[in-house]
């Protein structure tokens, strides 16, 4: 199913829910003037609306911030991988080949195997093992000359950044808004939609159109917040673009045959 089908169906469902409430609970005639206090109705409606806006705004702002941090973290990890790959150029020929091959393997594992797992809320054990093999190869690399020792130290420092950013990504997969907030948002949205019908809104065509639009807006806001809450899931989640970029940089570094940084 397309990831855009869920918000569409939920929006239509919210509109249908509001329409049915207005159709069957609303009055079918003109409401006599003075049945309800206008000030009381305005106050109750404002409270319901404010509650829903507060909860939805909290959800969207928090989820959007987490999504932005997760996306930034993947590029930080990709840059650290590139730095490690570059620094490995100063190692002895055999060590350089081994470390760079393992870095490519790890990056490929993240791009192809781990991102589908991230969408399901977990990381890939195989990717963790691939990164550990990189660390083992860097640690075992020889440092007979000063420039090789400097390259090894630089590669270890960059690799530590990879571990740090990867750990942040693993934490971002498990992060989310507390479930009780979701229940409160859905309940306040339902009360907000039902409010006009419960108080006896006349079921004229104009009123039903307005209530249906409100129901659609509420349902769309809830689903939007829910989709933003998953940092690595379509349609708004982080993509594997950072690791595609890292692989392209690996190829560029191989072509440049640049020396290690100092």
Image (cartoon, grey):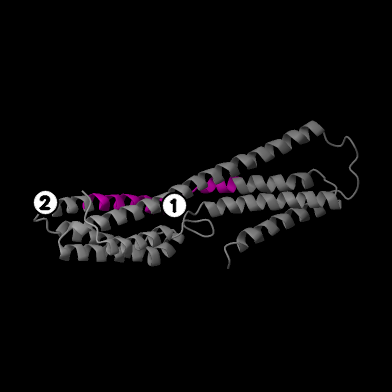
Q: Secondary structure at mark 1?
A: helix
Q: Answer above or below: position of 35 versus 207.
A: above
Taking the image as shown, residue 176 lies to the left or right of residue 131, namely right
Taking the image as shown, residue 249 lies to the left or right of residue 47, namely left
Residue with the mark numbered 2: 146
Q: CA distance from mark 2 to mark 1?
A: 37 Å
Question: Which residue is more in the foreground, 207 or 140?
Answer: 140
Question: Which residue is more in the foreground, 184 or 134?
Answer: 134
Residue 217 seen: yes
Taking the image as shown, residue 244 lies to the left or right of residue 41, namely left
First to last magenta residue range: 156-184
Q: Answer above or below: position of 41 versus 117.
A: above
Instruction: From the top left corner, tell me how far across and down residue 247 is, in percent.
Output: 35, 63
Question: Which residue is more in the foreground, 244 or 169?
Answer: 244
Q: Answer above or below: position of 86 versus 50.
A: below
Q: Residue at x 26, y 51 (%)?
A: 158
Instruction: From the top left corner, tell me how far across and down residue 146 is, in percent.
Output: 11, 51
Residue 166 seen: no
Taking the image as shown, residue 222 lies to the left or right of residue 38, namely left
Q: Residue at x 77, y 49 (%)?
A: 211
Q: Quadrant of the N terminus?
A: bottom right
Q: Which mark is residue 71?
A: 1
Question: Which residue is more in the foreground, 189 or 170?
Answer: 170
Q: Is residue 169 magenta?
A: yes
Q: Is residue 168 magenta?
A: yes
């Amino acid at each position: 199913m397309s990831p855009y089908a869920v918000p569409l169906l939920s929006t239509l469902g919210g509109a249908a829910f509001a329409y049915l409430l207005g159709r069957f609970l609303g009055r079918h005639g003109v409401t006599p003037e003075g049945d309800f206090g206008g000030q009381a109705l305005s106050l109750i409606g404002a409270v319901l609306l404010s509650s829903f806006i507060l909860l939805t705004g909290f959800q969207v702002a928090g989820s959007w911030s987490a999504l932005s941090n997760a996306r930034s973290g993947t590029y930080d990890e990709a840059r650290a991988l590139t730095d490690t790959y570059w620094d490995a150029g100063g190692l002895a020929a055999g060590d350089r080949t081994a470390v760079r091959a393992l870095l490519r393997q790890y990056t490929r594992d993240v791009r192809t195997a781990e991102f589908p797992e991230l969408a399901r809320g977990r990381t890939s054990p195989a990717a963790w093992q691939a990164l550990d093999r990189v660390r083992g190869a860097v640690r075992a690399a020889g440092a007979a000359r000063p420039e090789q020792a400097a390259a090894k130290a630089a590669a270890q420092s960059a690799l530590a950044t990879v571990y740090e950013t990867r750990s942040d990504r693993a934490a971002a997969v498990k992060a989310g808004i507390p479930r009780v907030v979701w229940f409160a948002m859905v309940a306040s949205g339902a009360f907000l939609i039902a409010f006009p019908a419960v108080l006896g809104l006349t079921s004229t065509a104009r009123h039903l159109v307005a209530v249906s639009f409100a129901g659609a807006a509420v349902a769309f806001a809830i689903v939007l917040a829910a989709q933003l809450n998953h940092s690595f899931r379509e349609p708004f989640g982080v993509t594997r673009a950072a690791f595609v970029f890292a692989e392209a940089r690996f190829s560029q570094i191989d072509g440049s045959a640049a020396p290690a940084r100092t």
